[in-house]
Amino acid sequence: MGMRFEDVEAWQRARTLVSAVYRLTRGETLRPDFGLAGQIQRAAVSVMSNIAEGFERHHASEKTQAYNVARASCGEVRSLLYVVEDNYPAHAVRAIELREQSEIAARLLSGLIAANERRR
């Protein structure tokens, strides 16, 4: 059996990020902030889902498009984590840690995009 999207390090990192975001947003403090909690959850899931979708695409341009959406969603997650940091000081340290995780996923995605472009 060949490589699967589950084997891609960027997807594995995104999965870890999604779990961490859900743990954060399900806590007593953030859970009542439905707008913020839902938006950051959706953005994190978008990273993971678009990596999987891009991996499964056959055409290089479609792969790149999905990976770019995933990378943009990393930026959205990072931005929303500033909202958490600024408005929920008790979660500031965790927000910073999750931003770092998101940056790692974005760097890995940049590598996937570059490798995919070289194959075109």
Image (cartoon, grey):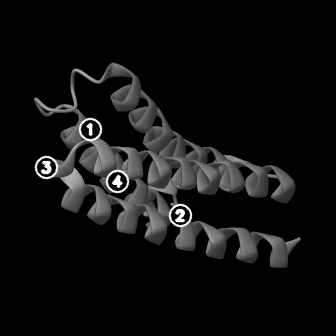
Q: Is disc 4 placed on a helix, strand or loop?
A: helix
Q: Amino acid at mark 3?
A: Ala
Q: CA distance from mark 3 to mark 2?
A: 41 Å
Looking at the image, is mark 3 or mark 4 earlier in the sequence?
4
Q: Tag on residue 17?
A: 4
Judge depth for marks 4 and 2 and give the one in front: 4
Do labels 3 and 2 touch, CB within 8 Å? no
> Residue under circle 2?
3
Name the residue at the right extreme.
Answer: 120
Quadrant placement of the C terminus? bottom right
Q: CA distance from mark 1 to mark 2?
A: 28 Å
Residue beneath the point at 53% across and 64% down = 3
Q: Amino acid at mark 2?
A: Met
Q: Is disc 3 placed on a helix, strand or loop?
A: helix
Q: Amino acid at mark 4?
A: Leu
Graded by Cα atoms within 10 Å as few (under 14), some (14 to 19) or many (20 or more), the crowding at tag 3 reads: few
Looking at the image, is mark 1 or mark 2 earlier in the sequence?
2
Residue beneath the point at 52% across and 48% down = 47
Q: Horizontal and vertical percent for residue 81?
A: 38, 50
> Residue under circle 1?
22
Looking at the image, is mark 4 or mark 2 earlier in the sequence?
2
Q: Horizontal and vertical percent for residue 83?
A: 39, 45
Residue beneath the point at 38% across and 30% down = 36
Whether residue 8 is visible, yes or no, is: no
